[in-house]
Image (spheres, rainbow, N blue to C red):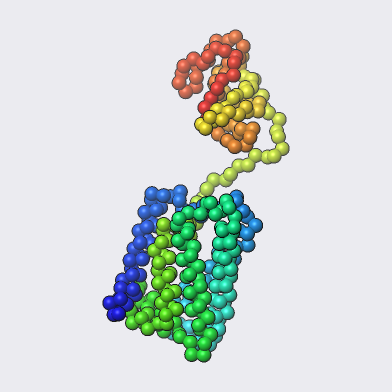
Amino acid sequence: MKHLHIALWGVLPYLTLVLLAGGTTWRYHYDRFGFTTRSSQLYESRLLRIGGPLFHYGLLFVVAGHVAGLLVPEWLTDRLHVSEHLYHENALLVGGAAGVATATGLAVLLYRRLRVPAVRAATSRSDRVVHPLLTAVLLAGLAATASGMAAHAYDYRRGVSIWFRSLFALDPDVSAMAHAPLVYQVHALLAVTLFTLWPFSRLVHAFTAPVGYLVRPYVVYRSRTPAAPYRHPAGTARAVITATRGRTWKSPRCAIFSPVGRPGRGGSAFFGFRAASGRATGYLRFVWQQGAGHPSPDARTGQAAPATGRRQRAVV
């Protein structure tokens, strides 16, 4: 049993840390667009509005409680004049409420995933492994919290917390965790397993934050009120736009800007467009010809544009 305890509480945590850090780095390097929740809000939003905030906000309080309980030593709370009774009462009330809220939110989300056909179809194989494991971690944590209500309850600050802090000193106190109650050991092993699978599931989105929004340029939105089109002396054009997927839209009559050429003799121009269906946006270089004038050169290639008044076709 001694070798098993060393393997579980002295070696396994470091292997989990290596997989967590290495797997996250590997996925960020090779699957950066996979750092997402693969949101299913388009399929169903009513239950998601209930279960999502319950789960995530409750989980924030659960994580804060673990940080305070595992990383803050007992001598520090004594120096802050926080009695042991007050500390455990707060842990039971706040931690228990946060755990119940998190478990309730997870139950709503799992019910939604099982009952809504579109959401169930979007469930991946990793979700089928992570969701039961996450449920087991929460239930084991609630059981460990409830065990603290007994008259002579186990003080995890003198056992589990000492083992956890000893991991950072690279000198794990295996005996401190080996003598902990079974419910705490099960909770710790399930959590270690969850962190091992973390980089290879949608849970990896917890390591992302929209920091780029702080320095990104402003997004310019067009007004809903249609403005009168500006007509350049060179004239206007009506283009048939063919997208890369092979669909064709007819753009509304649009004003041309940045022309190259002389009025009455055609030329080329760049103009922005948005398809009538609202599904495509982009920029297009358009070459046109007016009247019976001479062909004008293309602005990029220098080749002569077709001397015809017919509408041109362009690929987005």
Please say if 173 is above or below 20: below
Residue 273 rendering spot, x and y as whole percentages: 60, 31
Closer to us: 247 or 217: 247
Closer to us: 111 or 255: 111
Q: Quadrant of the N terminus?
A: bottom left
Residue 135 can be seen in this image: yes
Closer to us: 258 or 120: 120
Closer to us: 157 or 224: 157
Q: Residue at x 34, y 63 (%)?
A: 18
Q: Residue at x 62, y 27 (%)?
A: 250
Residue 311 rendering spot, x and y as whole percentages: 59, 19
Left or right: where does residue 155 sit relative to residue 224? left
Left or right: where does residue 46 sit relative to residue 99? right
Residue 161 can be seen in this image: no
Please say if 58 is above or below 220: below
Left or right: where does residue 227 sit relative to residue 161? right
Q: Residue at x 42, y 80 (%)?
A: 182
Q: Residue at x 31, y 71 (%)?
A: 11
Residue 170 rendering spot, x and y as whole percentages: 31, 73
Residue 184 rendering spot, x and y as whole percentages: 43, 78
